[in-house]
Image (cartoon, helix red, strand yellow):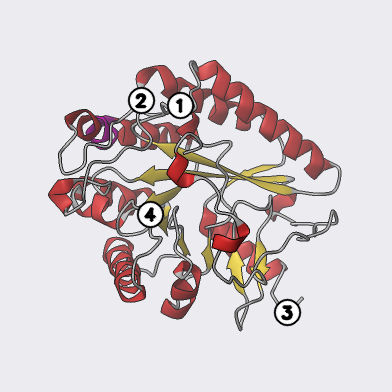
Amino acid sequence: MADDPSSEDPSPRDLPDRDLSDRDFVGYAGAPPNADWPAGARLAVNFCINYEEGAERNILDGDGGPETRLTDDYAQPRPGARNLYTESAYEYGARVGFWRIMQAFQDRQLNATVNLVGLAGEKNPKVLEAIAESGFDINCHGWRWIDYHGMSEDAEREHIRKCVDQAVRVTGRHPEGYYAGLPSMNTRRLVVEEGGFLYSSDAYNDDLPYWDRSFDPPHLVIPYTLDTNDSRFSSMVRYQTADQYVTYLKDSIDCLLAEGRGGAPKMLTVGLHGRLIGRPGRIVALHRVLDYLQTLDHVWVTRRADIARHWMAEHSAQS
């Protein structure tokens, strides 16, 4: 937090020795490849339904205090105690909001991705059944919805393994992607070591997939997006109305579609949460955006796994 003195940037002399070789400020250097999306699409749009409810911090699950993130009101830290407001707000996402979001896509026969937090799914088998029946792909979102910074490698490795086992049980296949949300320095390496994943999404640094060549073979990264995320409805940075969110999403779509029509097709990710966009006064924003997308030519509304497979086929790491 910017107003927390304990979180101020340390002076250079306080910083540990770090290897910055993994940082890439160049990327495609203003000359991105032609994504060549299927059927001549000039923009790929992926909606990620984040299912986190029940995996957030709670002393009932052995945590030191309650969750404080991504609710409608400020949630006090309360070390060692429960926060019934926060618990109830998260329960709304599981009981009501998730189903509203799913219905919006199913009514329009559109595809989406579920960012599934493992423990949240275990606490609501009906949600796991709905995911299996939907045909949506699973992007593993960690076993807990927590900050993985500082977790031991062995513990995080076990979390990844549990996510894989769950996805196989639910869908009959290995999950395609992994997005911790708050990763450790080890997360991507552990995902690669686990094997079977097509891509990782713990990055926010591009409008197109790219290859992380620090691994052999290179590992595909499909960046996530936070500015188009419905988290802007939360207490810290709030949209007041559905119209504000619709305007921002439509402007983002229009800009990227214009770039695509100009010869540089791009990708857009939209993150959704049942406890946020799933509220009655906000779900209309999702309806309006989905309806708008269906009026546009050359837009591919698709699953994250489909983007990964396309990129691997058309823009292999060896090309």
Q: Are marks 2 and 3 in contact (CB under 8 Å)?
A: no
On screen, residue 122 versus residue 291, left or right, reads left
Q: Secondary structure at mark 4?
A: loop
Q: Amino acid at mark 1?
A: Phe
Q: Nearer the viewer, residue 84 or 170?
A: 84
Of marks 4 and 2, the one in the foreground:
4
Q: Amino acid at mark 3?
A: Gln
Of marks 4 and 1, the one in the foreground:
4
Give the image location of residue 48, x and y in percent. 47, 45
Q: Are marks 2 and 1 in contact (CB under 8 Å)?
A: yes
Ranked by sequence position, the earlier of labels 4 and 2 is 2
Give the image location of residue 223, x and y in percent. 60, 54
Q: Residues within 10 Å of mark 2 (few under 14, many from 20)?
A: some
Q: Amino acid at mark 2?
A: Asp
Observer able to see residue 237: yes
Residue 233 is tagged as 1
Q: Secondary structure at mark 3?
A: loop
Q: Amino acid at mark 4?
A: Asp
Residue 72 is tagged as 2
* Cα distance between the residues tagged 4 and 3: 34 Å
Residue 147 is tagged as 4
Span highlighted in magenta in the image:
89-96
Q: Are marks 4 and 2 in contact (CB under 8 Å)?
A: no
Residue 318 is tagged as 3
Ranked by sequence position, the earlier of labels 2 and 1 is 2
* Cα distance between the residues tagged 2 and 3: 46 Å
On screen, residue 112 versus residue 44, left or right, reads left
* Cα distance between the residues tagged 4 and 2: 20 Å
On screen, residue 46 versus residue 236, left or right, reads right
* Cα distance between the residues tagged 2 and 1: 7 Å
